[in-house]
Amino acid sequence: MNKDWQRNKPAQGVPACSDAVCAMLDRVGVPRNSKWRGLILYMRGIKDYDFLDNEQKEQIQALVMEVLKVRDFSDEKFREVIKINERILSAPWNRALTRTLQETASLVQEFQETLFRHKGGVQKLENVTVEAVETGGDVERMLGTIRRGFREMASMIEKDAEKMVAMSLTDALTGIHNRRAFDSHVGKAVERAVAEGKPLSLFMCDIDFFKRFNDEHGHRIGDQALVVVGSILKGFAEEIKQLEDRDIFPARYGGEEFAVTLADIGKDEAEELAEIIRRKIERYNFVIRDPDGQILVGGIKINVSIGVAELLADCASPNVDHLVDAADKALYVAKSSGRNQVRAYERPRV
């Protein structure tokens, strides 16, 4: 049984509910003083749990509605619902684990190839050294040959090391920064913004109905959609850098979600820039091609929802977690309000 539900369940009885909610549960036949009532009350209040993302909240709410619609309150159905709930809760961790394993496998392969290249370089250096000694001749000339061999080897190792570092910070699918790079960058950006008292904005961008897109067109086409969004974000950041010399840092945050940090940019301007990106993605004419490059289907549209927040204006305390949480809450509002829109974070009224 889910530990979070058990942790939030009262020690005796079931969670308290309002008269209206209890009356609704009575109407649909949920047994009183039962584990079903406690589970449903917990699941109905799941929107208030910050440890869940927007998709999880939507899926759990849909599960509640399905339970109330079917009205099967047997023990067997209870166990089935618990298992579905646990799958929903663990899905982000499973996706993150899969993504990490894929990235690790790619890095291991690249590292193996690098080692083989270095092995060849070492053998070549050994051959040059042996040849220089065996042929005799001028000592300075021999030392010069050996030094050149070592310099070439050192240069190759240095280039490979730089490449490995870049790979570890790049999302293999989209070619933009990955979550590891984002975590490093946003941490430094927050420290700088706090120290200098300058604005720092963040927006979280999520592809609308991505699961449905995958189910309809297949995961290979879904990957292409992720590449398109990543390319648009990267191109926009490069354009802003070139035209205005301003730093915008796009990254794939996880799954179909992207994060973009905007240094020295307040929330109002960040919201305007987010709207520009939303329109760019909306206008993109996505096509599906066969392995030979022929267009099979055209005119497919990709929409995104974006939530925007500013560090010093929207956070209870100026740190990364609060900034991401504020942007994520704004994203949830954008998605729950119809999707394909930009929403800025608004502090709850006291």
Image (spheres, rainbow, N blue to C red):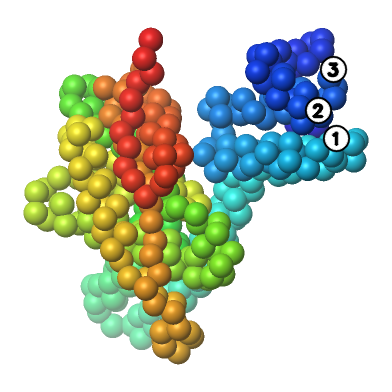
Q: Amino acid at mark 1?
A: Phe
- Residue at left 90%, top 40%? 76
- CA–CA distance in space, label 2 to label 1: 7 Å
Do the residues under discs 2 and 1 have CB atoms within 8 angstroms? Answer: yes
Query: Would you identify the image quadrant in which residue 287 lies?
Result: bottom left
Picture quarter with the C terminus:
top left
Which circle's residue, 2 or 1, is located before the other in the chain? 2
User: Are there few (<14), some (14-19), or many (20+) residues within 10 Å of tag 3?
Assistant: few
Q: How many discs mark residues in the rendered view?
A: 3
Task: Label 3: state its secondary structure.
Answer: loop
Do the residues under discs 1 and 3 have CB atoms within 8 angstroms? Answer: no
Picture quarter with the N terminus:
top right
Q: Position of residue 33 (x, y in %)?
A: 85, 17
Q: Amino acid at mark 2?
A: Val
Residue 167: which disc?
Answer: none
Closest to the observer: 347 or 66? 66
Q: Amino acid at mark 3?
A: Asn
Q: Is residue 276 visible?
A: yes
- Seen in the picture, residue 149 relative to 61 is either above or below; the reply is below
Residue projecting furthest to the front: 27
Q: Position of residue 114 (x, y in %)?
A: 47, 68
Closest to the observer: 185 or 316? 316
Q: Badge 2 is on which residue? A: 30
Q: Badge 1 is on which residue? A: 73
Residue projecting furthest to the left: 243
Q: Badge 3 is on which residue? A: 33
Q: Position of residue 211 (x, y in %)?
A: 55, 57
- CA–CA distance in space, label 3 to label 2: 9 Å
- Residue at left 34%, top 46%? 341
